[in-house]
Each structure stands twice: as structure tokens, then as C-alpha cells.
């Protein structure tokens, strides 16, 4: 199962060109919807205005070389290792999901664009990475959904309480789950079930990549920019001139005591 390219197996029924076109369309949907989301929510304008305000209160100039160093630290800490998470289990779940998604998408693209014909011989590495990525997505995604979500852990809400913001993680988990089940039935030659779960896999993938405007998918593109800006404002001293944090009333003896934040 894990050494078989599932896309090569179905190429006798679905032409490679159709599969490749689907991948390109999903890619364009993500790019287009993300750009529309930036314009619609004025995210770029917000970051620009925030940067201008920060420069006015900066105490020193950050050089180009220092900005490159900050960008590198942002990429290695906030992006690649998710160091902003205080909770170890939340960080692990996020990393499993993130790297699982990366492996899954890259392996999918390689197998569809390079080895999706009946006569092609797929190197065993790519099916292995595809199945590993899907498994990592399931572990990280289900761990997050059932045990780590803030509203479930802190507020005692049920795991099946679904909101529009949950569209991203649910479609992501569904895509990985249906992919593994489809691969299993395909490897065992169960035609009816493999067709069913292949269809569910396509539906979940379409919802994930086509539903960017209604999910948190675009947030993964905002996160590095926000983290970079935060480091720059700290480096130029403008962050030190921001208002006092939320515990200011307690500091001045106004009788309001705040609990320490809990990280799940």
C-alpha cells in the first residue's frame, strides 16, 4: 500500500491531464482567494499603516542586514519550528500537521505531474512520503480537534461544535483521512469502496483549497509577515513605546486581578 502511487493506478480511468489540470486549478484558487482576502480585509493596508506608525516611535534605525537576520530568525523560529506556542503538545500537533501537509502536497504534485501514467514507474520514496504526510496530518489534526482546541479545553464545549472557522482544519483532516482509506481499498482491489473514498477525497480537497475565503487557510500566509513585523518593532524600539499590557489596572491598584493565561 505505502509503496504504490495511487494516482498512477487510477490513470487508466482518469487521464493524467485531468488530474494535472485539477491541481493547477486548486493552486490558482488558493492564490486568487488569498489575494482577494488580503484586499477585502485590507490586511496589507493594515500592516503598512502599522509599520508607518511604528517607525514614528522608533528609537533606532534597523539596517538592511539586520532585517535579513530578523527574516531568517522569523523563518527558523516562528515558521519552521513554531516557537511561539507555549504549550508543547500544541506545538507538536501544529508541527505534525504543518509538515504532514507539506509532504502530502509535494508528493501529490510530483506523483501527478511525473508518474501518473499507467506505464510510469514511481520511485517508492514518493508514495512513502505521500502516505507519511497523510498519516502525520491525521495524527496532528485529530489530536488538535479532540484534545487541544481552546474552546473545547477551556470552555467545556463539545468536540462536535463546529463553526465556519473550523472549515480549514476539518477539510484538512478529511482530505488526509479519505486519502489513506482510498489508498487502502485501492491496494486491496475493492473497487466500490475505493471509488467512494476517492470521490470523498476529491470533495474534501476541493473544499480545503477552494474554501480559502471562508476558512483560516489564508492565515498561514499572514503569520510570517506578522511575526517579522513584531521582531522589527522590537529591534527598532518602537514596541517599547506601546501602551501598558492588559494587567495595567492591577498594577495601579484598581482592584482588578487578572489570572495568568493558560496555554493548551
Image (spheres, grey):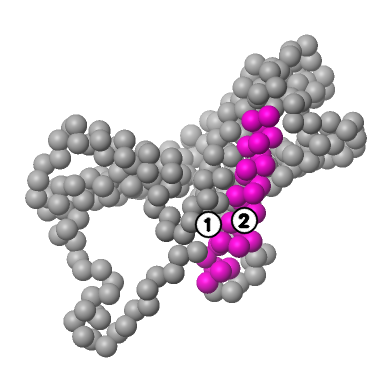
Residue 138: within the magenta?
yes
Where is residue 135? Give x, y as percent.
Answer: 67, 42
Where is residue 238? Give x, y as percent.
Answer: 16, 53
Where is residue 211? Give x, y as percent.
Answer: 58, 45
Give the residue at mark 1: 89
Give the residue at mark 2: 143
Residue 178: within the magenta?
no
For disc 1, the neighbor class at 10 Å (few under 14, some 14 to 19, many from 20) is: some
Residue drawn at x 54%, y 74% as measured from the top left: 155
State the residue lying farthest toward the top: 119
Contact flag, marks 2 and 1 (Cβ < 8 Å): yes
Q: What element carries label 2?
A: helix
The quarter of the image holding the N terminus is top right
Q: State the extent of the magenta-drawn residues as a range.
A: 128-154
Q: Which of marks 2 and 1 is nearer the N terminus?
A: 1
Relative side of 189 to 140, left or right: right
Residue 122 lies, with reference to residue 185, above or below; the image says above
Residue 258 seen in this snapshot: yes
Where is residue 84? Give x, y as percent.
Answer: 39, 53
Of residue 15 and residue 130, the one placed in the foreground of this image is 130
Looking at the image, is mark 2 or mark 1 nearer the viewer?
A: 1
| Mark 2 and mark 1: Cα distance apart in space | 9 Å
Residue drawn at x 64%, y 19% as measured from the top left: 113
Relative side of 138 to 200, left or right: left
Relative side of 219 to 114, left or right: left
Amino acid at each position: 500500500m505505502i509503496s504504490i502511487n495511487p494516482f498512477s493506478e487510477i490513470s487508466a480511468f482518469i487521464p493524467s491531464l485531468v488530474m494535472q489540470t485539477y491541481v493547477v486549478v486548486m493552486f490558482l484558487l488558493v492564490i486568487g482567494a488569498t489575494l482577494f482576502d488580503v484586499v477585502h480585509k485590507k490586511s496589507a493596508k493594515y500592516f503598512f499603516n502599522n509599520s508607518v506608525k511604528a517607525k514614528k516611535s522608533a528609537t533606532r534605525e534597523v539596517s538592511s542586514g539586520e532585517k535579513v537576520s530578523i527574516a531568517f530568525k522569523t523563518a527558523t523560529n516562528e515558521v519552521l519550528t513554531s516557537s511561539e506556542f507555549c504549550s508543547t503538545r500544541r506545538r507538536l500537533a501544529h508541527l505534525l500537521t504543518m509538515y504532514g501537509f507539506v509532504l502530502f502536497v509535494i508528493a501529490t504534485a510530483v506523483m501527478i505531474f511525473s508518474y501518473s501514467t499507467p506505464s510510469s514507474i514511481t520511485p517508492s520514496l514518493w508514495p512513502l512520503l505521500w502516505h507519511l504526510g497523510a498519516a502525520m496530518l491525521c495524527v496532528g489534526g485529530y489530536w488538535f480537534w479532540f484534545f487541544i482546541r481552546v474552546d473545547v479545553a477551556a470552555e467545556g464545549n463539545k468536540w462536535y461544535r463546529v463553526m465556519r472557522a473550523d472549515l480549514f482544519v476539518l477539510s484538512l483532516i478529511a482530505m488526509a483521512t479519505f486519502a489513506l482509506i482510498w489508498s487502502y481499498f485501492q491496494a486491496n482491489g475493492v473497487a466500490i469502496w475505493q471509488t467512494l473514498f476517492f470521490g470523498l477525497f476529491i470533495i474534501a480537497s476541493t473544499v480545503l483549497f477552494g474554501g480559502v475565503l471562508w476558512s483560516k487557510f489564508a492565515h498561514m500566509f499572514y503569520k510570517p509577515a506578522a511575526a517579522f513585523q513584531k521582531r522589527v518593532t522590537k529591534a527598532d524600539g518602537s514596541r517599547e513605546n506601546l501602551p501598558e499590557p492588559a494587567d495595567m489596572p492591577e498594577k495601579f491598584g484598581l482592584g482588578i486581578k487578572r489570572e495568568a493565561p493558560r496555554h493548551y
